[in-house]
């Protein structure tokens, strides 16, 4: 499903499994958000959430049950991040360019904060933490370069698995990881890092191939 984006008429591509349910919930809750809470307040909430996530990682070095707070913070961020743009459009008070920049930049900070939090909590080897941060940062860079190159903004991931599904996975992970031995958590982090790294390489290859074809098509039309 495509929809015009507020930024320069770019298309927003929706393909996530959770997107239909998420859109219904947003439509229900947007009119019920208190008038004192504006879209910019919802967007900025991700910044303190990011700091609290990192703090939770440090506290979890002594007691892993603190990681459950990460799941609660992801839930709160999920709610505010889902509602901010919708509230701005509903009330016609949204800041288009500021909102676009701050919403996506704060999402990036929050994602990196989660990686840092778990890396600190379990004191991952530097190589594992670096790999996870590299893949996380690379994904955001890829999405924005791809968006400006193709005039399409992918807001729900690939193969039906996107940010919403990843957040649900992180929420579940925060509730169950404290009960697993360190060796299993470390091994799982390494496997996930390698898996997403390989997926990222495949994504880059597929994206550059698609953009190449677009360029060739334009050249033939001239």
Image (spheres, rainbow, N blue to C red):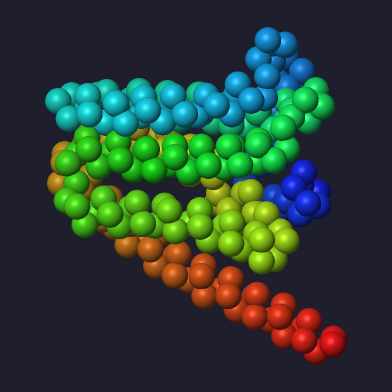
Q: Is residue 210 left or right of residue 48?
A: right
Q: Is residue 67 left or right of residue 26?
A: left
Q: Is residue 195 left or right of residue 11?
A: left
Q: Outermost residue toward the right?
A: 221
- Quadrant showing the C terminus: bottom right
Near-viewer residue (220 or 205): 220
Q: Which image quarter: residue 67?
A: top left
Q: Residue 90 at what x, y percent from top left?
A: 80, 26
Q: Is residue 2 above or below residue 198?
A: above
Q: Outermost residue toward the front?
A: 98
Near-viewer residue (219 or 22): 219
Q: In this view, does 11 lie above or below 63?
A: below
Q: In this view, does 60 lie to the left or right of 167?
A: left
- Residue at point 30% right, 36% down? 117
- Residue at point 44% right, 65% down? 199
Near-viewer residue (76 or 37): 37
Is residue 98 in view from this perspective? yes
Q: Residue 209 at what x, y percent from top left?
A: 60, 79
Q: Which image quarter: residue 182?
A: top left
Q: Residue 96 at what x, y percent from top left?
A: 73, 37
Q: Residue 48 at what x, y percent from top left?
A: 44, 24
Marks counted in the figure total 0
- Residue at point 21% right, 57% down? 127
Is residue 184 in view from this perspective? no
């Amino acid at each position: 499903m495509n929809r015009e984006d507020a930024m320069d008429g770019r298309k927003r591509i929706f393909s996530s499994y959770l997107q239909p349910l998420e859109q219904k919930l947003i439509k229900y809750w947007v009119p019920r958000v208190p008038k004192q809470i504006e879209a910019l307040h919802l967007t900025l909430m991700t910044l303190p959430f990011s700091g609290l996530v990192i703090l939770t990682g440090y506290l979890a070095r002594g007691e892993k049950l603190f990681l459950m707070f990460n799941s609660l913070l992801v839930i709160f961020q999920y709610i505010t991040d889902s509602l901010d743009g919708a509230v701005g459009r509903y009330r016609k008070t949204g800041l288009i360019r500021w909102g676009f920049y701050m919403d996506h930049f704060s999402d990036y900070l929050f994602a990196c904060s989660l990686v840092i939090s778990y890396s600190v909590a379990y004191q991952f080897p530097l190589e594992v933490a670096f790999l996870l941060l590299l893949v996380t940062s690379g994904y955001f860079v890829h999405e924005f370069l791809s968006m400006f190159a193709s005039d399409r903004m992918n807001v729900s991931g690939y193969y039906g698995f996107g940010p919403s599904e990843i957040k649900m996975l992180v929420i579940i992970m925060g509730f169950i990881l404290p009960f697993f031995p360190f060796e299993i958590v470390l091994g799982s982090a390494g496997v996930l890092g390698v898996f997403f790294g390989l997926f990222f390489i495949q994504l880059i290859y597929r994206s550059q191939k698609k953009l190449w074809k677009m360029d060739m098509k334009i050249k033939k039309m001239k």
